[in-house]
C-alpha cells in the first residue's frame, strides 16, 4: 500500500484534493540577539528581500535573494534562523513559556529548540533530547551559533525521558514522522502505509512516556509534518482515551483536526487540533494537550 | 578554567568564572545559568553556554566566549563591511580595512575582530604593529578563528 495514487486517494477521502506545493524559504528572527527592524534592513542591504508571514510574530518569507540566506554574517552570528513557516508554529503555542522548565523531546537539528530559547529570552531551562548522536552535533552547533544559554542536551531516546527524573511545565514533541511530499519530492516513491503505522506506534510511545514527565498544569505541544491521520488525529484520539489528556485549542491557520477518519469516529475534541495541508507552507499537524483536571 | 582565564588574558581581558556554574565535560567547558544548574544531569552532551575546548594542551575558544569577552575591556579591532566579509571567509585583515582599535596595537598581541555593529566575528593575532592613520596595504591581523567556521564545520 503505497504510491502517489494510494496516498492522494486517502487525502481525497479526508476531504482534501491533492495539489503540488513548493513551500517558500522562510527565516525566523532571533529577537534575543537582534532587533527585528535592524535585521530586515541589514538583509535588504545584502540583497535579501523579506515578506512578513502574517501568522507568525518573527517569521519572514524570503521573497528574493541575491545571496544564500544561510551564508550571511547575520546568519553566522545567530541573528536569525532558517526555518520553514509551518515548522515555526508549534513552539509558539505554549500559553506561557518564559522562565519555565521545558522539554524538547525530539530536538535535533535544533530549529525549534533555538526558537523556544528565543521565546524564553534564555530564561528558565530547556532539556533537549535526541536519540541520534550524529544529529546532536548539528544541534550543538545551532545552539552555539544562536547563543542559546538555557539548554541542556542529552543523547537520549524520548521514550526514556522519565529516566531524567524531571518534571516539565512545557513539553514539545515534534515527533519523528513520515514527513510529507511538499518537503520531499520523492516522498510518494519511498513511503508506505507500513512506515506510517510504524511511526504512529513510535509516536504513541513517545507521547505516553513524556506525558509521565508533565507537571499537573503543564502543556504538551504535539506536532508532526505528516499528513497521515494515523500519526496525527488518531494518535491524539488515542492519547485522550489512554493517557488522561485533553486537547486545548490551537491558535494558528489551518483546518480543524479531523474527527471522522476513514469512517472511524474520533473524540469530538480532536477538532481543536490544527491540520495544515501543503500550500504556501509544507503540511503540518499541531495539537495542544493538558492533563485532564489540570488548570485551563 | 585556568586555560579560559589565560586565553582571556591574551586578549587583554579579564574573566571571572564561578566554579559552581562552570562545568567540564570531556575536554569541553560549559557555563550554566542558575535554572539549568538545578536540572542538569551528569550525562549531558551540551549545556548552557559552550566556552571552548582544550586539545593537545591548547585552548580553542567558542564564539560565545569571544562574544562575552567582546563586551568587556579587551584588545579589539573594528573593521569595515568588506573586510568583515573577507574575515568571515577566512581571510586576514589589511590595515586599510580597520576603522578603530581598542587596547593593544602591538605586534604579537591577540585581538577580537568586530564588525561595524560591534558584533564579534572571531579573533586574530596582530602580526604588524597597527598604525594610527589606518592606511596601508599590508596584512596586519592574521585570522585565527572566525564565525564562518559554522559553515565549514557542516562540510
Image: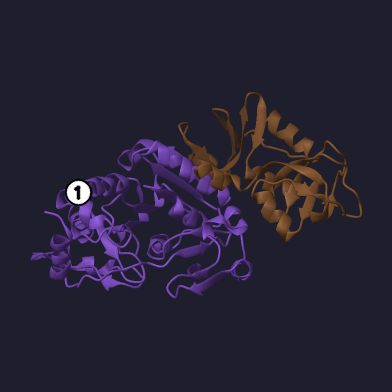
Q: Is residue B22 above or below residue B99?
A: above
Give the image's coloring scheme. by chain
**Which quadrant is home to the C terminus of chain A?**
bottom left
Residue A19, percent from left and from top? 25, 71
Q: Nearer the viewer, residue B144 or A240?
A: B144
| Residue at left offset 31%, top offset 51% | A175
Q: Nearer the viewer, residue B112 or A98?
A: B112
Q: Colour of chain A?
A: purple
Query: Along the horizontal axis of the image, is B151 left or right of B113?
Result: left
> Can you identify the residue that label 1 sits on?
A195
Residue A237, percent from left and from top? 19, 59
Q: Residue furthest top?
A: B56
| Residue at left offset 78%, top offset 44% | B141
Residue B107, percent from left and from top? 86, 38
Q: Secondary structure at mark 1?
A: helix
Query: Along the horizontal axis of the image, is A131 left or right of A193?
Result: right
**Which quadrant is home to the N terminus of chain A?**
bottom left
Q: Nearer the viewer, residue B13 or A120?
A: B13
Residue A249, percent from left and from top? 31, 69
| Residue at left offset 72%, top offset 38% | B16
Q: Is residue B95 above or below residue A82?
A: above
Q: Is residue B11 above or below residue A22?
A: above
Q: Nearer the viewer, residue A86 or A217?
A: A86
Q: Is residue B75 visible?
A: no
Query: Along the horizontal axis of the image, is A166 left or right of B11?
Result: left
Label 1 neighbour load within 10 Å: few <14, some 14-19, many 20+ = few
Q: Residue furthest front?
A: B137
| Residue at left offset 69%, top offset 50% | B87
The chain ID associated with circle 1 is A
Q: Is residue B128 visible?
A: yes
Query: Along the horizontal axis of the image, is A50 left or right of A133?
Result: right
Q: Colour of chain B?
A: brown
Amino acid at each position: 500500500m503505497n504510491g502517489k495514487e494510494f496516498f492522494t486517494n486517502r487525502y481525497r477521502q479526508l476531504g482534501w484534493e491533492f495539489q503540488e506545493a513548493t513551500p517558500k524559504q522562510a527565516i525566523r528572527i532571533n529577537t534575543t540577539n537582534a532587533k527585528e527592524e535592524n535585521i530586515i534592513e541589514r538583509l535588504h542591504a545584502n540583497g535579501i528581500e523579506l515578506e512578513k508571514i502574517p501568522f507568525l510574530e518573527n517569521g519572514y518569507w524570503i521573497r528574493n535573494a541575491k545571496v544564500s540566506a544561510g551564508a550571511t554574517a547575520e546568519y553566522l552570528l545567530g541573528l536569525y534562523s532558517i526555518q520553514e513557516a509551518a515548522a515555526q508554529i508549534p513552539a509558539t503555542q505554549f500559553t506561557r513559556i518564559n522562565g519555565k522548565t521545558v522539554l524538547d523531546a525530539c530536538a535535533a537539528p535544533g530549529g525549534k529548540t533555538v526558537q523556544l530559547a528565543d521565546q524564553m529570552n534564555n530564561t528558565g531551562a530547556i532539556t533537549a533530547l535526541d536519540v541520534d548522536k550524529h544529529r546532536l552535533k548539528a544541534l550543538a552547533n545551532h545552539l552555539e551559533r544562536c547563543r542559546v544559554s538555557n539548554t541542556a542536551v542529552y543523547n537520549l531516546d524520548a521514550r526514556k525521558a522519565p529516566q531524567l527524573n524531571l518534571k516539565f511545565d512545557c513539553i514539545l514533541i515534534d515527533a519523528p514522522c513520515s514527513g510529507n511530499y511538499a518537503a520531499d519530492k520523492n516522498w510518494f516513491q519511498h513511503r508506505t502505509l507500513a512506515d506510517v503505522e510504524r511511526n504512529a506506534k513510535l509516536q504513541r510511545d513517545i507521547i505516553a512516556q513524556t506525558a509521565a514527565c508533565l507537571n499537573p498544569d503543564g502543556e504538551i505541544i504535539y506536532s508532526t509534518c505528516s499528513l497521515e491521520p494515523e500519526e496525527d488525529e488518531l494518535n491524539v484520539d488515542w492519547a485522550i482515551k489512554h493517557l488522561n489528556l485533553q486537547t486545548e485549542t490551537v491558535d494558528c491557520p489551518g483546518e480543524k483536526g479531523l474527527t471522522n477518519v476513514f469512517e472511524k469516529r474520533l473524540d469530538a475534541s480532536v477538532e481543536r487540533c490544527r491540520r495544515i495541508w501543503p500550500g504556501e507552507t509544507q503540511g503540518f499537524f499541531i495539537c495542544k494537550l493538558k492533563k485532564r483536571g489540570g488548570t485551563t | 578554567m585556568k586555560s579560559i582565564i589565560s586565553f582571556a588574558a591574551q586578549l587583554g581581558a579579564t574573566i571571572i568564572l564561578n566554579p559552581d556554574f562552570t562545568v567540564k565535560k570531556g575536554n569541553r567547558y560549559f557555563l550554566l545559568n542558575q535554572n539549568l544548574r538545578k536540572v542538569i544531569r551528569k550525562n549531558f552532551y551540551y549545556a548552557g553556554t559552550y566556552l571552548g575546548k582544550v586539545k593537545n594542551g591548547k585552548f580553542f575558544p567558542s564564539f560565545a566566549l569571544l562574544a562575552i569577552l567582546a563586551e568587556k575591556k579587551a584588545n579589539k579591532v573594528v573593521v569595515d563591511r568588506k573586510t568583515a566579509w573577507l574575515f568571515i571567509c577566512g581571510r586576514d585583515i589589511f590595515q586599510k580595512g580597520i576603522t578603530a582599535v581598542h587596547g593593544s596595537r602591538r605586534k604579537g598581541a591577540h585581538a577580537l575582530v568586530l564588525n561595524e555593529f560591534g558584533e564579534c566575528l572571531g579573533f586574530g593575532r596582530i602580526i604588524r604593529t597597527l598604525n594610527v592613520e589606518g592606511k596601508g596595504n599590508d596584512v596586519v591581523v592574521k585570522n585565527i578563528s572566525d564565525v564562518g567556521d559554522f559553515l565549514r564545520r557542516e562540510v
